[in-house]
Amino acid sequence: MPELPEVEAARRRIERGALNRTIEAVTYGDDITHMDLPDRAALDRFTGTQFSTATRHGKFIFAGTQGGPWMMIHLGMAGSIRVMDADEVDADYIRLTVAFEGGTRLTFRDPRKFGEIVVVEDVEDYVAERGLGPDALTIGDNAFADVIGGTRGAVKSALLAQSKLAGVGNLWADESLYRAGILPDARACDLEAGRIGKLHGVVGDTLKAVVDTDAVYSKLPADWLIHRRDEGADCGICDGAIAKTKVGGRTSYFCPDHQTGA
């Protein structure tokens, strides 16, 4: 599932190629049954306007026109955003297209149909209505200590709770805990303040590093867990081996040698 870095890469594509272009039409793709998309009247509000900004909160992208409305895009399990030139051929599974004057178009591709697009009037109100916590790249030290360090359950489950911390998913939660040396099933409230502070720094550094590659995993350091998410694989940090377990119903990879509890 796309997480904060992958979603930020999509937001950057919109920013680089789809802003300040007049929208000619917004059209549905093939087979949009059982998808959460705006109705025709809502989409027609964008005709003749321009996206002037593209922002993000957690895993949610917001492309906004001057004075509103905004188009919220959630990529779901396998969605993606592309900005296409006039002579490029669309891929399969395009569910929505924003066509601009001159032939450029913004496409939302979603093979599994778990994505979502909503017309939004106010981003802050929408974030509050969805019950999202602070964005994982902007949350401060004290807020992180409160929402994560104050959790009685597993620290990984706390990182995944979008109401506590918006943007972190299974992949980068495992990576952050691996690099911070903390077991995924350690009780968050049992971790010393210094370890919570270190975890906050590692979460931010991890997400920023992936964002800097535009979520191209092959560009990430060789000792990262992303390159060895397989039970029995060599740990990139110590002489241990990667193990697998379930935490809060989610498959978790970790190194039992250098990752510890409280």
Image: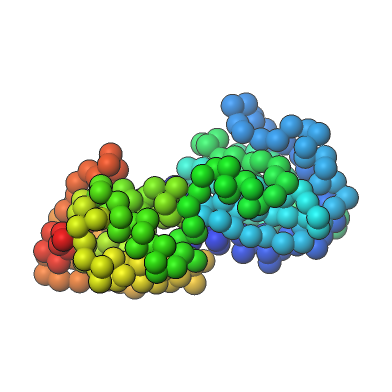
Instruction: Between residue 194 and residue 184, name the one nearer to us.
Output: 194
Q: How many marks do you count on the picture?
A: 0
**On the rendered structure, is 18 left or right of 193?**
right
Q: Is residue 86 visible?
A: no
- State the residue at coordinates (64%, 29%): 31
Q: Is residue 63 visible?
A: yes
Q: Position of residue 120 (x, y in %)?
A: 70, 45
Q: Which quadrant of the figure has residue 18? A: bottom right
**On the rendered structure, is 78 left or right of 121?**
left
In the image, is residue 47 above or below residue 220? above
Instruction: Between residue 187 and residue 259, name the one nearer to us.
Output: 187
Q: Position of residue 51 (x, y in %)?
A: 77, 57
In the image, is residue 26 above or below residue 243? above
- State the residue at coordinates (60%, 31%): 35
Q: Quadrant of the C terminus?
A: bottom left
Q: Residue furthest right?
A: 48
